[in-house]
Each structure stands twice: as structure tokens, then as C-alpha cells.
Amino acid sequence: MVQRKKIMGALVTATVLMSLVAGCGAKTAEPTTASTAPQATKAADAPAKAGDGKVVVGFSQIGAESGWRGAETQSIQDTAKADPTIDLKFSDAQQKQENQIKAIRSFIAQKVDVIAMAPVVETGWEAVLKEAKDAKIPVILVDRGVDKKNEDLYTSFIGSDFIVEGQNAAKAMAEHLGDKGNIVELEGTVGASAATDRKKGFDDEMKNHPNIKIVKSQSGDFNRATGKQVMEAILKSPEGKDIQGVYAHNDDMALGAIQAIEEAGKKPGSDVKIVSIDGIKEAFEAVKAGKLNTVVECNPLLGPQLFQAAKDLKAGKQLPKWIKSNEDVFTGQKAIDALPNRKY
Ligand code: GZL
């Protein structure tokens, strides 16, 4: 009889131990994709693992519209993977604001420690940011901002000064044009803070260069194919007959425009000077090839700063309202010299 009791006791202990191990194993950060089927979203709404000491961060990414965006996603995922104290729940919105809002609601339902997001546009966030505030979950904005009137609904913005980037682009363009000529502006996604402020900074600086005219300004939505299509159409239009420069809000649109200019029988980088923003490797290679003139850097490697900020918040520390990226401007030989060390 005693023997049977001992065997039963051992079996019960083993069963309990097995369930604990399985529970721990389940703690790996399963990426949620809020834009997946509802049942997946329901599963993703399960509360985040409480009490395991990890910092649970829900990140709503815009999508994959540019090389820069891909580099940012890589930085965030690699940093989380390398840090055992971080549990990242990643959602790709495929460029749709409604998917970002769904993802944020899912993170709130999961009771994550911190919500982070790259808002595709500046407006339309008030309701969901209020829900996060009511749920006492801090929000960190990454690489793009929201309407100033919602400033009290997020804790910190990690990203660049787009107005300065626009100003630097304008100074470089004026230099390349000898302070006179007609230019085309390829704008980023309509309503995105990066596009609005890069345009503002550029236009502000251009007030100091009255002999440079922006003859056409149109959105290429921050992606290469659209940038090329827009540039092709402009080159065929009356305004496109006499263009000396192109200012692109990001490298992907600049690289699309370069293709369009070459197909129109002109030499990008000499007949038409090109200035763009981001600093992806392909843009540096285009400078080396003499097809692009100045790259204004915008740092996408924000993973380390994001997760340090999340840990600081969980530890009860205060964050600055704006954690600003340090960036440089690369023209000619300086870009060529920097190329071997570029990380994205
Ligand atoms: C800038 C970021 C912009 C990049 C583009 O912080 O929001 O979005 O400049 C990207 O390449 O699409």
C-alpha cells in the first residue's frame, strides 16, 4: 500500500513540474500581427505574462514601404531578440492606420507594459491613445509624430528633427545648383509628420534662395515605384521640360526618380542634381556612382533607444518628451568614404 502511495506521489509531482516547464516555454514573444484573422487577434489578446520580470512591449509598425523602414524593423526585432528581459509583441499594419489602431487595442487587452508605435499619419489617434492612457499603459512614439494637440497622450517621441533635415536638404540643393534653377519635390506619405516637416524645413530655407523655384511638388508615398511613376509623369509635363534638381523626402523615391531621369535620356547627378533623406546604403552607392548628390541622414536604428526607454519607464524613471536622433549630411567624397561603414 505504502509503495502505491509513493508511486502516485511521484507521478503527481512529475505532472506539476511538466506543466510549469511548458508554461515557461510559452513565454517566448510570439509576434502578434493585428491585421491577421480575428481568432489570431483573440489569441493575441491573452494577458501578457505577468510577474516574469520581462518588460512586455507592444510595437505597431507601419509596414515595409522603404529600405529605411525595413532597417528600423530589423533594429527593433534584433534588439528584442538579443535581450532576454524584453518580450516584444510586433504588429505590421501594412500601411493602414486602422490596423495600427486594432494592434494598439490588442496590446491594451494584453495589458503590455509599454505601447510603442510609428504613427503612419499625424491625425486620428486621439481615441485610442486615450484608451491607452485610461489603461495606464505609457505610449512611446517611434520615428513619426502625432498631432500637437495630443501631446499629453504619449510619454516620449524617439526620432529625428525633420524640419532640420529639410533645411539641410535645401542648403545642399542650393549649393549644387549654384543658387538658381527649377526643382521638383517628391513628398512622402500625405499627412505623415516626416513629410510635413521635411517640406516645411525645405520651404523655410528656400526663402533664402529666391532664384530657386519649386516648379512641382507631389507625393510619392515614400516608396520607390511611386516615386518613379510620379517623376516619369512630371518629366513628360510642361513643368518637366526645364528641371535642374530633385528633392526627395526619402532615398527610395530618389532612387525611383533616378531611374525615370535616366530613362528620359538625362544624367541624374549632373544634368539633374538629386538630394534625398534617409541614408540607406543604396543611396550612398548612388552618390559613389555620381547619380545622387547629397544624402541627409535619418537614423532608423532605434531599437536600442526604444527598449532602454521602455525599461526606464517600467523602472519608474522619467523620460524626456523627445529623445532626438543624432544625424549627419553626406555629400560627394564624404559619402563615398562613409559607405563601407554604413549599417543599413
Ligand atoms: C522617418 C520615417 C520615414 C523615412 C521613410 O523617420 O518615418 O518613413 O524617411 C519611411 O523612408 O518610409
Image (tube, rainbow, N blue to C red):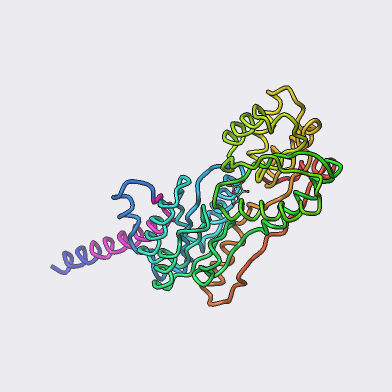
Compared across the picture, whether 288 is left or right of 147 comes to right
Quadrant housing residue 286: top right
Of residues 174 and 9, which is closer to you in this image? 174
In percent of width and height, residue 127 lies at 40, 65
Residue 24 painted magenta: yes
Q: At which x and y percent is residue 143? A: 59, 56
Instruction: Determine the residue positioned at 46% across, 64% down.
Output: 56
Quadrant placement of the C terminus: top right
Residue 121, compared with residue 258, is above or below; it is below
Query: Left or right: where does residue 147 sit relative to residue 166?
Result: left
Magenta residues? 11-34
Q: How many marks?
A: 0
Which secondary structure is most common in the magenta stretch?
helix
Q: Residue at 63% across / 29% down in the picture?
A: 232
Q: Residue furthest front?
A: 238
Asked if residue 53 is positioned above or below residue 302 in the image, the reply reads below
Query: How far from the left and from the top, in percent, is residue 293?
Result: 79, 39
> Residue 194's spot in the image, x, y percent?
61, 53
Pick the residue in front: 138 or 190: 190
* Magenta span contains residue 289: no
156 to 261, vertically: above or below: below
- Name the residue at the left extreme: 1
Image quarter hosting the N terminus? bottom left
Q: Quadrant of residue 167?
A: bottom right
Picture residue at 61% right of the left edge, 36% below the top? 227
Q: Nearer the viewer, residue 213 or 11?
A: 213
Give the residue displayed 56% in from the left and 47% down from the top.
Answer: 189
2 on left or right of 282: left
Question: Residue 316 vs residue 281: left or right?
Answer: left
Q: Quadrant of residue 216?
A: top right
